[in-house]
Image: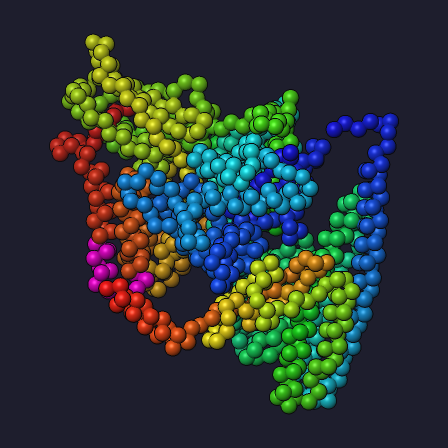
Amino acid sequence: MTSDPGHLDFGRLLSGFDAAEKAKAQQRALEQLLQDLLGIADALRELERHCADLEGEGVRDVPRKSVEVVRRRLMAALEPYQVDPSQTSADAEVRSKTSQRRLEHLLVELLSIADALHELEQHCADLQSKGVEGAPRERVNDVLHKLLAMLKSQQVERMDCKRQPFDLDRHEVLEVRPVRGMADDIVLEEVVQGYIWNDRVLRHAKVVISRAENAPETLSKRARRRKRKHRDQN
Amino acid sequence: MRAIGIDLGTTNSVAAIADRGRPRALTNRDNEVLTPSVVSYYKQRGKDAGEMVVGRQAINNAVRDPANTVFSIKRLMGRQYGDRRVDEVQKRYGFQLATAPNPDAEDQGVKVQIGGKTHTPVEISAMVLKQIKADAERALGEEVTHAVITVPAYFEERQRHATAEAGKAAGLTVLEIIDEPTAAALAFGLGKEDQQHRVLVYDLGGGTFDISLIQMYNNNYAVLEIQGDNWLGGDDFDQKVVGHMTEWISDNYPVDPSKRPGFLMRAKPEAEKAKKALSVQQRTEVLWAFNEPDHGMIDMQMELTREQFEDDIRDMLESTIGLVQTALKNQTLGPDDITAVLLVGGSTAIPLVRSLLAEVFGENKIRVDVNPMECVALGAAVRADTYDLQPGGADKEKEGTAIAVHHVTPMHLGINSVKGEDVDHFEPIIEKGTPYPLDEPKKKIFRPSEANTKILRIPVYEGLNAQASLNELQGDIEIPLAIGLDLSQDIEISFDYNRNRVLTMRVRIVGKDGKVILDKEHALAHSRPRPKSRTAPAAGADGKGGTIDQDWREGLIPTIRMGKHFVEGYGDYMLDEDRRELQDAIAQAEKASKDNDEATGKRAALVIDNKVMGSGLASLMYIAESVMSKANAKQARVLAQAIAALRQAHAQGPNEQFEKLVQDVRVVIADIISAKIDTVPAVGPDYGGRVRTLESR
């Protein structure tokens, strides 16, 4: 198709305008998210200090190092976003797509940080159940909830998989476990939590699902039926 | 009505479209450019019928139903039962092949069993293509009707045909099937000029490695040479990083994470991330905190430098450079003859890949300006854009955009003849580098090797070695004659090689009285083999053998590859001690090659040879599968069945039947070998009916 240079292509102009606006909005959203994440990093630093204080008081098994690893990972995730290469492109559509990809990449990385905080919280719960005084479960939980709330503000939502039927679009099966008295294809365990972003899968849940195991009585009933059928046929 | 380009890959597939001459990759319904080339049969429990799912959904279902999930179907396209490559694929993945048909059945094409039904590889590929078509339509908002699909340059005609059939079955009009390296060159915008280019396409993907040397000039593309490794890629590199992570944890905590279910699955994305980071920076830190049930938190802060990572993968990458050198040598070209090196596949982002290639070709020849993951599909889209789409299928190339893709033979095609007393002489008839299809057949005159010859035997080979048996056998033709030939009778043998890579041999004998004694044609379905793992002996004083590998280190490469292939394919059948010794010898050979230590290298090569040939059941399996290529179709099928039975019996542990099956396999091997021996005359020199090369030639 050839275009007439004497006439303006309004459709193209409008789509260019839309793309420019979209790119700007995405950039603004990304900047806001980065600011919020620096707040999370501060909270983690505070938690790290708290753990160090507990250690100083002689409390054993305080997960200071784990908090440090999580904080450093968050800082490492934010590092590439100090400079935004998408803004160097003159093409608004390219800018918009690049911003979108970068945002997605950052969100996926944040999910790994959320995973680590989940596991840390679980660890603190284990410590508490063993009677370890001062395991900072609540503080870890606070940081985790701040992070999840921030992800939610970006339309990132956790899938609710446990005890749900296997969903081909959302769950990746890692293991099938025989369970007596349970129906087939029920999610027993979420080894890696799944997340949805703007109604599409940002990360698939990696799950263990059930396979119904027949009780021995059922088997023998079936065997008896088969035997009877065989006898009738003969 | 739109035409797209499709890179139908072994692991992943990509679709692209060219808009106003600018190609771009299309995203699928998961907003990804890569669609896993995986098909699975998904049936909800309790429901009577299921459905075929493709791509990400198929991956999600793979562990749930491994027997009904097909990976890497491209490796099975156009293949037949009894082919070793079919066994390799089946061994790596859990899906079922349909039972091999009766040996006398006409259709010996391999089929997979999925969802209770038998499907051909064409049908499975069609499902992938159908999904790609639907996703492209969603992305474009209009109907996709036509496609250019890419295939590896080494695909034989029947595999190309099968791919085109798959496109058709997916509801696409296949405009053209083009070679992947040619598509890559198109994406890089090469070959349009009047200037002649010789380009090396270095394609290192997730699981396969391919090199192609292509020559281009004014929209003419010719694939000169192909080398590669079917089982080398980025997954191997990730595994090295996972190895470091496992070691770090074991060194710092009293746990062995490799035994923890799910650890490898969780570690792999971290390893991939570290690998990618090391492509742009000198060092990275794996920061990973996770809860280990039996211990508590594991706080991994493992620093990994690019140098360490490069040390880990250097051997693998150097082996790819070895294949690059072989490709150049086979074409008697030097690095200066190459105008550009195009990088294709995600693993080419690794700086060591680029620096090793730059050491050979110089930095300014390495081209990285097109996304290596997408460039094959982008090139196919560029090609698709050169067509004027017409309703009713009368599609034709737009004026002035014709691209001619032609091929040249990568190796000599010839016969095993007698020269002097040498009964293993290889006489080329079509020399390597000959453009095909041929304008006219290539012919040579031979004579009988013994008086009163009543049976001619003409083994046809492809290769570059002066010793016929070290080349690849393409067919072994026996021709009974009505009368005995005397020693001065001329025998004209001509070879024709057509577009579909079918080699036709014609044998013509005209008596001295002008009467035609024999005029017979034989068509041989010719294949272009992947690199062999056979050791080529060094050149002897008589000049026999070793025409490719003069340098001892280059001679060592195939021995190492053979050893690795043996451990990988047959290691399960070896004694632990033998396997360890072989693995040590391989490591020694690799180190000796690196240190240029010839004595150690040769000693290690000897150990590798001895272990490969003298490791009991493992060697028997290896020999059995090696003689498969020498067997006729019926023998190959009988042997394949015997091997399958032996494997099954071995898996069940020691039993009486096992010894009998070992004996069966031995008998079949002996049958195959003796079938050849039977053709040798009982008295006189051992010429076996071969024709004699004229000494003056």
Q: Choose top left, top right, bottom left or bottom right for residue B426.
A: top left
Question: Is A9 included in the stretch rendered in magenta?
Answer: no
- Residue extending furthest toward the left: B683
> Residue A216, position in %: x, y?
38, 76
Note whether residue B175 is visible. Answer: yes
Q: Is residue B60 above or below residue B257?
A: above
Instruction: Quadrant for the C terminus of chain B, please.
Output: top left
Write the start and end of the magenta stretch as one range. Answer: B650-663
Question: Is B659 included in the stretch rendered in magenta?
Answer: yes
Q: Residue at x 70, y 58 (%)?
A: A199
Q: Is residue B187 above or below residue B68?
A: above
Camera-nearest residue between B286 and A163: A163
Direction from residue B657 to residue B318 in the image, left or right:
right
> Residue B386, position in %: x, y?
63, 28
Q: Residue at x 22, y 37 (%)?
A: B676
Direction from residue B99 to residue B273 in the image, left or right:
right
